[in-house]
Image (cartoon, rainbow, N blue to C red):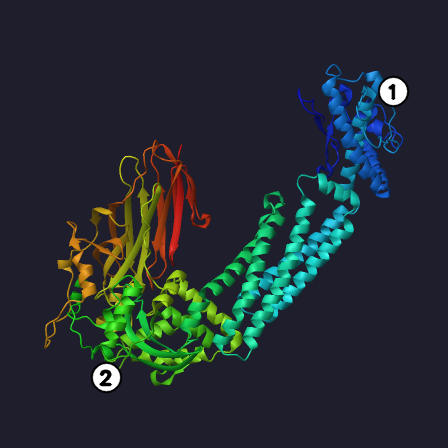
Amino acid sequence: MGREPSAEGPLVCDLFCGEYPRRVSHLVVLPKVLPTRFRSEPDALLSRVVSPVVPSPPPQRLQREERSVGREEVLRELQDVLAQDAHRTTALFQDVRRLRVSVHAERTRSRNVSTVPAEAARAQHVHARSFTPPASPPRKPRVKIREAFRVGVGALTLGGFIALAASAGTLPQMTLKVRGSATQGATALHSGIRSLLTADAHAGRGSFAEAQRAFREASEELAASVTVAQRIVGAVDPAGRLSRVEALLRAGEQLARLGQEASAIVGEFQHGNAALTDALEALSPKLATLDRELKDIRKQLAGIPLDRLAGAEAEEVREVVQNVEFLNRAIENFLTSEEVVLELLGARQDRQYLVLFQNNRELRPTGGFIGSFALMDVSRGQVRKIHADTIYNPDGQLKDFLLPPQPLRKITDRWYARDANWFADFRVSAAKVAQLFEHSGGPTVDGVLAVTPLVLEELLRLTGPIPMPDYEVTVTAENVVEETQRLVTYDYDRQQNQPKAFIADLLPEVLARVASLPRERWGELVEAFIHTLRSKHLLVYFRDDAAEASVLALGWGGALPQMPPARPNIFVDHLGRVEANIGGHKTDDLIEQSVEYDVTMHSENRATATLVVTRHHRGSRHGTPGVKPEEDPARKPNVIYERTFVPPRSELIEARGFVRAATVPSPFTAGAYTQPLTADPDLQALERRQEEHDSGVFLGEESGLTTFGGWVITAPEETTVTVLRYRLPFQVPPPSLLASVARYELFLTHQPGHLPVPLRVTLRVPEGFRVAWSGPASMLTEVGDRKVRYQGALDRDLTWGAVIEER
């Protein structure tokens, strides 16, 4: 039960042992001046301290059951004593601390005194109730052995008092009541935050009010149940459990109050009469105030050590913290994007946008083939006018006779707006489409919006089904992609020869329904747009430089990342793949892909990267029942030209699985034009930097990155595998040159409009080094000393990194 003291320092023993529950254990510090007998037999010492209450039986007759019952009586008795005289206990504690200082001083002067004779100790008869230390220690203490023994017994008795105060009486009941109310408050708080994030102001207000009531009740229960003695325990308890509970309850009550204020703000926004743009501008200062207060609460929560809480309690607190952080980020995102949203909605001046409908079943660099477009006039948050049409009509009026990009010459010998989204950076492609549209007789627009069918799905979930009687179909979120595919590919009017007319007719209906949504559903609309923006199925371009800079800062502009300048011991990597379906029909949704990217670092040479892309065509050589063979995508090969974007100065080592350009079929007949075709300056500058590698892959530069471009043809029911192996422009310095650590950063760029792709990334470091850290943790699936791996889905732009250090 006890432990012998070390050569220096006090003896630490557990007062409550044996049958006593561990939750009431209390460590008591005994001075070294106590007799050896009492150091090794704390039970005997306890029996002497409380002998008037429970006579101590001979040790050989002490039974386990009798000792347990006797101690329970002692606990109850001592608890009553402490409850009757809490102030006296406080003074006792302070006096004992002063006497212990005196004991230490005396021991320093007299090193000859190490133990107390056993007979002197047995002569003492000290009782817990009668022990009263002097009010203050003498100025020059001359503590004798007897006084030292009294100090030790007093400290032991006081330890029993404090342990009893913390563990007996109403504390277990108090814990259950406080925990029950706090759990109820946390549950209501979670519910309120979820309601707030979905713009359900009424439900959110009720949940936050319930949370505030529950947290207040928990605080009151805690205040009423904790005695003065238990406060003393909190003062000397290094775990600080009581103060943590109080801090958490205060934070919960403050969060509930802020939640009610936020719900009121959202409710006012939803049910007000102001125009959308005016309502948004009025919302901003109120949310800014909430943002500051939420940050203060996050600081309070960050100061609470969750590792010292029990498992269930820590998990509840972490969930609250995560919800608060998510809500805080949502408000920050709104405040950051407010100017862009107001600009987009025409808050300060009317705006006209060119809306491009991109079919991602026929992928192109910025999301898909442009089959239809719409001109949309917006003023103060209202869509004033929409005109939609097939892209072939303005293309037929194009005055420019331009050579298309080299790969597109397999299917056309002239460049039109429908093919102008060739550049991987949406800023460049959008500007080029707007330029060719203007040269076709169209107006000069303020910006360009590009959407894929996924955006229509999200909007139709809000608007509900839309009847299209001219086409004998009702369009829903579930069938919009299939019906669009059918009507623009197979069942269109062959005499008018306008296969994209259905989209041109559908877009105005959808946008008109969205514009008429009631205000209480605006929150759902915002959530839908945020989802499509993050997944890059909706892209935004402004002609105005300042507005465009704001769009790019939010990540809504579809731009490729700008590689930072080289810095010592910081290795920046990039991987982006851009596919262009060229004569491969609408087959991209039939292709299953997986990507493996392996980076191996070397200490004596540059790092090497290996990229393996596997494709499988889910179509059938037998075709789709009811579809003409010449029009059935399931029977058609998937033909793409793929560009891989890697860091500048990367060097290709080998490429396998690609098809040489000369062998790619060219299913078109060149047209006869009245004037010669000329090269577009932007396109010419891009292609001037390209050269063909021995493997048939084209090396080039675009948007500050190195590109590897090649053809891939995948027939129905077949699988193709392409491999690129290349040197990266960095290496791990020799150990003697490595300052302390090195950092590896990888930017993964997701192609707009592309369906999610399974991805596995592996980083390996050389001998003599180890991976000290990698993250974010949510992106890790395997962590080793010299290897880390991420496996997941690439459905948006991602950033991943690791810290490398010498062993």
- Could you tell me the amino acid type at mark 1? Ala
Dividing the picture into quarters, in which one does residue 183 lie? bottom right
- Which residue reaches farthest front? 139
Image quarter in which the C terminus is found: top left
Q: Which mark is residue 269?
A: none
Circle 1 Cα neighbour tier, 10 Å, few/some/many (<14 / 14–19 / ≥20): few
CA distance for labels 1 and 2:
118 Å
Q: Is residue 636 left or right of residue 5?
A: left
x, y percentage for residue 90? 80, 39
Q: Is residue 752 left or right of residue 208?
A: left
**Secondary structure of residue under mark 1:** helix
Of circles 1 and 2, the one toward us is 1
Q: Tag 2 or tag 1, which sits nearer the N-term?
A: 1
- Pointer 1: what residue? 123
- Mark 2: which secondary structure? loop
Amino acid on which the number 2 mark rests in the picture: Gln
- Number of numbered callouts drawn: 2
Q: Is residue 201 above or below residue 469?
A: above
Spot occupied by residue 694 in the image (x, y as percentages of width and height): 14, 49
The answer to whether 2 appears left or right of 350 in the picture is right
- Residue 240 at what x, y percent from top left? 67, 43
Q: Residue visible at 86% across and 41% down?
A: 85
The answer to which of 572 and 198 lies nearer the viewer is 572
Nearer-the-camera pick, 54 or 390: 390
Which residue was labeled with disc 2?
Answer: 496
Residue 487 left/right relative to 346: left
The residue sitting at 72% across, 28% down in the picture is: 13
Q: Is residue 728 above or below residue 487?
A: above
Q: Is residue 227 above or below residue 51?
A: below
